[in-house]
Amino acid sequence: MGRRRLYLRRFLRNRTAVAGVVIFLLLVLLSALGGLFTPYGYADTDFSALTQAPSAEHWFGTNQGGNDVYAAAVHGLQRSLVIAVTVSLLTAALAAVVGAGAAYVGGRVEKATLALIHFLLVVPSFLVLALVSHRLAGDWRVLILVLTVFGWMSTARVVWSVSTSLRERDYVRAAEYMGVRPLRIVLRHIIPNLGSLLIVNLTLGVVSTVLSETALSFLGFGVQTPDVSLGTMLADGAGTITSAPWLFAFPAGLTVLLTVSMTFVGDGLRDALDPTSTTGAAGARR
């Protein structure tokens, strides 16, 4: 049995992980196609239905300004997904190059890189994120940039630790003797052997990014109006949770589904890619 087929078989045996994939794909479809099922846009107002409970016309109800909550939730989910997936991809790529590169080069470069990583790890990143994103008017593109800048260090530290053993492998030494350039060795011989680690961190990074973006937006430092994210919707609905609970319940439900589904997927990938794990087999027996 090939390695990829073995990994896929182990992953599919984990029913929780498969359920996570299904939920995540449904959320992606909702964010991409959900707007086709309503005549309202997320910024459209219906002044005849202010803070209206869910109905046949407004499936998720309306907010204080007459905006359709369903349309806003679809757009907010889309915005949160774009931010989370983009940041996770960028941080994983940056962590892989920096961590593996520092481990392979060694010497002063390695020491300087580790010093930078350790310094950034102790910086109160949440406060810096809040100040920078708020000062730049909460543009979601800027939010992606600052979340990436302060989100790669932990993964890079793990990548460096693993790469210190990979740099001593025979295939790396053989590439050096053949005159392969260091950058090519890092990209072609070290990083590909970190695939399982990076994939798991990528999926779990989506969860942490969603939580960070939601927290920043909830506190007013993330995505700003007239744009909408799940965090801004939670912030708007928090003050009316008793009088108009639908304003908080629907974005909260989407946030929970998104984070839980990616957590299930990340755990499933970790078990599938870990040769010592027996979770997949245990799930099959159950």
Image (cartoon, rainbow, N blue to C red):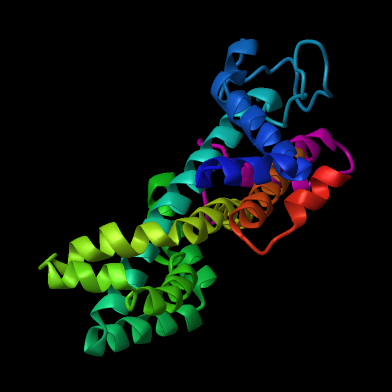
Quadrant housing the N terminus: top right
Q: Residue furthest left?
A: 179
Placement of the C terminus among the 4 image quadrants? top right
The residue located at (36%, 72%) in the rendering is: 99
Residue 234 placement (x, y as % from top left): 70, 45
Q: Residue furthest front?
A: 1
User: Measuring 64% from the left and 12% from the top, which residue is drawn there?
Assistant: 37
Which is more toward the observer, 14 or 153?
14
Q: Which residues are magenta?
A: 221-250
Q: Position of residue 173 (x, y in %)?
A: 24, 74
Nearest the viewer among 273 and 31 is 273
Indicate left or right for 106 with 161 as reference: left
Between 80 and 110, which is closer to the camera in this rendering?
Answer: 110
Residue at 81% across, 11% down = 56
In the image, is residue 87 above or below residue 81? below
* Residue 114 location, quadrant: bottom left
Is 43 inside the magenta-drawn segment?
no
40 lies above or below 219: above
In terms of image quadrants, where is residue 27?
A: top right
Specify whether residue 143 is in view. yes
Picture coordinates of residue 53 (x, y %)? 84, 24
